[in-house]
Image (spheres, rainbow, N blue to C red):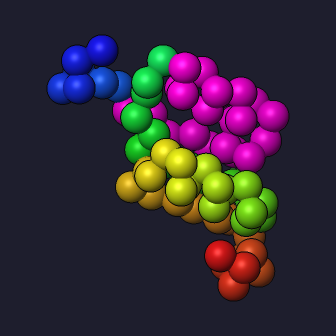
Amino acid sequence: MNETKKRSIAILGSTGSIGTQTLDVARLHGYRIKGLSANSSTKLIEEQAREFKPEFVCLTDEKAYKDV
């Protein structure tokens, strides 16, 4: 796919089953991940952020902030 036409998406709930499957599809088709969000799964969202390098990452559980 032409880099200038690459589609960007944000994944809400990226650490859940649907979110991880969506990232599998994005990986397969070369989608750019613009943003990721999760409730408190710090280890997995950190791995996802390192792989996909999104502009935005969000954790909704404030207690999980210190773990990142």
- Residues 60 and 55: in front is 55
| Residue 38 sits in quarter | bottom right
Instruction: Name the residue at 30% across, 15% down.
Output: 1
Instruction: Name the residue at 45% across, 40% down.
Output: 33
- Magenta part of the chain: 8-28
Question: In the visual, does 31 lie left or right of 68?
Answer: left
| Residue 31 sits in quarter | top left
Count of numbered labels shown in the rendering: 0
Instruction: Name the residue at 62% across, 43% down.
Output: 12
Question: In the visual, does 30 lie left or right of 37?
Answer: left
Above or below: residue 32 compared with residue 52: above
Residue at the extreme left? 4
Above or below: residue 41 compared with residue 12: below
Question: In the visual, does 44 lie left or right of 6?
Answer: right
| Residue 21 sits in quarter | top right
Image coords of residue 26 (percent x, y): 53, 26
Is residue 33 inside the magenta stretch? no
Instruction: Name the residue at 43% across, 24% down.
Output: 30
Is residue 15 inside the magenta stretch? yes
Image coords of residue 50 (percent x, y): 53, 56
Above or below: residue 68 compared with residue 48: below
- Residues 27 and 66: in front is 27
Image coords of residue 15 (percent x, y): 74, 46
Which quadrant does the C terminus fall into?
bottom right
Residue at the extreme right? 17
